[in-house]
Image (cartoon, rainbow, N blue to C red):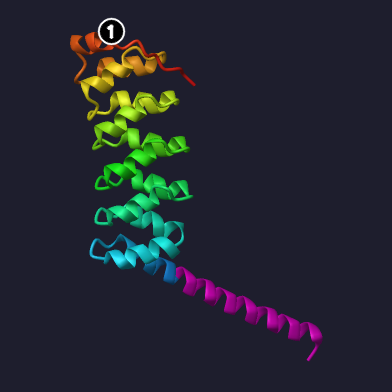
């Protein structure tokens, strides 16, 4: 046999073996994601997956409505924004986890929170003072915003925030009166 034929044979074997290994890895990852998505998965198993799992597994746990509160609080501090965004949309996530996300460094995480229809008033109150006008615009549109939150936004420097407040179902003269008590204006960016 020629040396080139031997090398070609070795390379082919390595490629096939590598593909097989990659395929097994993908199958294992897929299995872990499915386990993380199941509402019947025990908290101990979810904790192990949250500690060891890759981004897709952690995001699956973050979006699992049956996940343990302490695990969800842990995931609110996850290094990956995709995990935190998945958590932002989990309507069963505890208030403490959502409060952590309300101060997230990633604007997209805060945007997801502001858009969520079932959001804690404490979280919306924090987001109403967000430096991003885009976040404040969504808070002003959020049907879960209270009259107090709308009063915080009715005099916002951003015209779109003010327009959204005026379109809100709770908008009334009382909102304007509440706002006159508060003189805080938020900067736009």
The correct choice, above or below, for 95 with respect to 114 in the image is below
Q: Going by the image, does 45 lie left or right of 130? A: left
Q: Going by the image, does 100 lie left or right of 121? A: right
The correct choice, above or below, for 24 with respect to 125 in the image is below
> Given the current orientation, which residue lies at the most extreme bottom position?
1
Query: 55 or 95: nearer the eye?
Result: 95
Q: Can you say which quadrant of the picture contains the N terminus?
A: bottom right
Residue 127 percent location from the top left of the image: 36, 29
Q: Give the quarter of the image for residue 35.
A: bottom left
Q: Give the quarter of the image for residue 129.
A: top left
Q: Going by the image, does 176 lie left or right of 83? A: left
Query: 50 or 34: nearer the eye?
Result: 50
Query: Magenta stretch: residue 47 in it?
Result: no
Residue 56 percent location from the top left of the image: 42, 58
Residue at horizontal 28 percent and vertical 47 percent from the top: 93
First to last magenta residue range: 1-26
Residue at horizontal 72 percent and vertical 80 percent from the top: 8
Secondary structure, mark 1, is helix
Query: Magenta stretch: residue 24 in it?
Result: yes
The correct choice, above or below, for 12 with respect to 78 in the image is below
| Disc 1: CA contacts within 10 A as few (<14), some (14-19) or many (>=20) | some
Tag 1 residue: 180
Total number of numbered discs in the rendering? 1
Query: 166 or 79: nearer the eye?
Result: 79
The correct choice, above or below, for 157 with respect to 102 in the image is above
Residue 41 percent location from the top left of the image: 27, 66
Q: Give the quarter of the image for residue 18.
A: bottom right
Residue 134 percent location from the top left of the image: 41, 26
* Secondary structure mainly formed by the magenta segment: helix
Residue at horizontal 25 percent and vertical 45 percent from the top: 91
Residue at horizontal 24 percent and vertical 56 percent from the top: 66
């Amino acid at each position: 046999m020629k040396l080139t034929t031997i090398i070609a044979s070795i390379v082919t074997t390595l490629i096939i073996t590598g593909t097989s290994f990659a395929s097994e890895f993908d199958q294992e990852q897929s299995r872990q994601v499915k386990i993380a998505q199941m509402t019947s998965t025990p908290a101990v198993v979810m904790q192990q997956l949250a500690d060891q799992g890759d981004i897709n597994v952690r995001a699956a746990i973050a979006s699992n409505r049956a996940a343990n509160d302490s695990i969800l609080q842990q995931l609110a501090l996850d290094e990956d924004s995709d995990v935190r965004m998945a958590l932002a949309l989990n309507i069963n996530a505890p208030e403490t986890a959502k409060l952590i996300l309300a101060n997230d460094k990633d604007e997209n995480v805060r945007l997801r929170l502001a858009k969520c229809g079932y959001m804690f008033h404490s979280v919306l109150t924090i987001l109403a003072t967000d430096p991003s006008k885009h976040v404040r615009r969504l808070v002003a549109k959020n049907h879960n915003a209270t009259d107090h939150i709308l009063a915080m936004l009715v005099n916002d420097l951003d015209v779109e925030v003010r327009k959204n407040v005026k379109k809100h179902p709770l908008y009334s003269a009382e909102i304007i009166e509440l706002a006159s008590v508060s003189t805080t204006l938020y900067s736009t960016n």
